[in-house]
Amino acid sequence: MKLNGVRVIDLSNFLPGPYLSLSLADHGAEVIKIEQPGEGDPGRHIGLADGPHTVFFRNLNRGKRSIVLDLKRDEDRAALLDLVDGADVFLESFRPGVAKRLGVDYETLRARNRGLVYCSISAFGQDGPYRDRPAHDLATEALSGALSLNLGDDGLPAIPALPLADLLGGLNGLAGVLMALYRRHSTGEGDYIDIAMMDSMVAALRNVVGPTFAKGRQPNPKEERTTGGSAFYRLYATRDGGRIALAGQEPKFIHALLGALGRADLAPLCLRGPGSHQRPVMEFLEQTFAQNTRAEWEERLASLDVCFGAVNTLPEAFEDPQVLARGMVLRDDDGRPHIASPIRFLREPAQSALDAPALDQHHHLLKDTRT
């Protein structure tokens, strides 16, 4: 696999860091998860369990090794430093300043291992006025402005279903780690990577900042092209209570559906761009979709050149023929489901180990030396 021979020391918890190191583990890296005494990664105790581990924990930490160390103890810190000497990547998600207090900051570790790629993931990064504030995903989504565009039917900001700042922080960290490893081949030097979840959210706003950058105003979600102002980027209820998402606003898709429905005359309203002038199209589509079931609409829309998707529940999604055909559901020896790696290589594809470690299961590695 692509990352065979890469050793990762992972001190991160919860979601962003473990999501990053999971991608590395799925593609061959040896990930050694350093956990705190007692409860270990709090993810071990989040949500429902369907075996020895919570679903949350095993879907983020499969294929890793677990060692418990108390970094406030000199002997445990010395054991960690021994591991660092033979490592390629070091990952931590402490609040800024904590790693230095514990004696595992970048400068300290670089003095021992100049090729080390060190990645810190935090809510706000290593500098700035919010540096020392505690925060999880929702706070950074709120501060980034993204939450102000995520409105419920009452017009008020609603909690997103996915922790986007966590996930984007992990993905940006993954990109940074891989870039640094690539650069190390020519320089022999590692690097320090400072990932802020709030930065990651701000960077993800690129397709919605037109009104702000061009006119200095807050976007009106109900008038914008991807947040409610377009008839062809919208959810429609079907007769049986299902939902169909129309999700393509290119002229060819507009003409295809409205032509098939006998209302080609409405197309010019959509072609003018998003806004309240599209309301007659929305009303027509609302009335039209309500006349048939979700399954009937899926069959009809599949015969047209239209971007659409039925709104699946999670159980439906994990039985969806496309998800199954792509191998996105893996099952371990006990039949428990896992989400597969979405990174597909033609050569050396992911070979995910589906066993999640028990707390401190791999303490014996502290006595090993890397060869």
Image (cartoon, grey):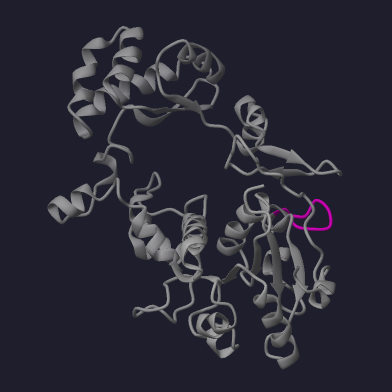
Q: Position of residue 1 (x, y in %)?
A: 67, 47
Q: Position of residue 10 (x, y in %)?
A: 64, 69
> Which residue appears at 71% of the width and 81% of the height?
82
Q: Is residue 55 left or right of residue 220?
A: right
Say which of 327 and 313 sits in front.
Answer: 327
Q: Residue at x 68, y 64 (%)?
A: 43
What residue do we see at 60% from left, 27% from top?
A: 322
Number of marks in the rendered image: 0
User: Magenta stretch mostly in which secondary structure?
Assistant: loop
Q: Residue furthest bottom?
A: 74
Left or right position of 236 against 41: left
Q: Residue at x 60, y 36 (%)?
A: 313
> In which quarter of the view is residue 268 placed?
top left
Q: Is residue 263 magenta?
A: no
| Rendered image quadrant of residue 222 | top left
Rendered location of residue 174, percent (x, y):
52, 57
The front one of 181 and 10 is 181
On whether residue 49 falls in the magenta region, the answer is yes
| Quadrant in which the C terminus is drawn | bottom right
State the extent of the magenta-drawn residues as a range.
48-55
- Examine the rendered structure and indicate whether residue 302 appears above or below residue 130: above
The percent position of residue 57, horizontal first and vertical second, equals 71, 59
Is there any visible trace of residue 192 in the rendered image?
yes
In this picture, residue 59 sits left or right of residue 51: left
Residue 46 can be seen in this image: no
**Front residue of this view, candidates 8 and 39:** 8
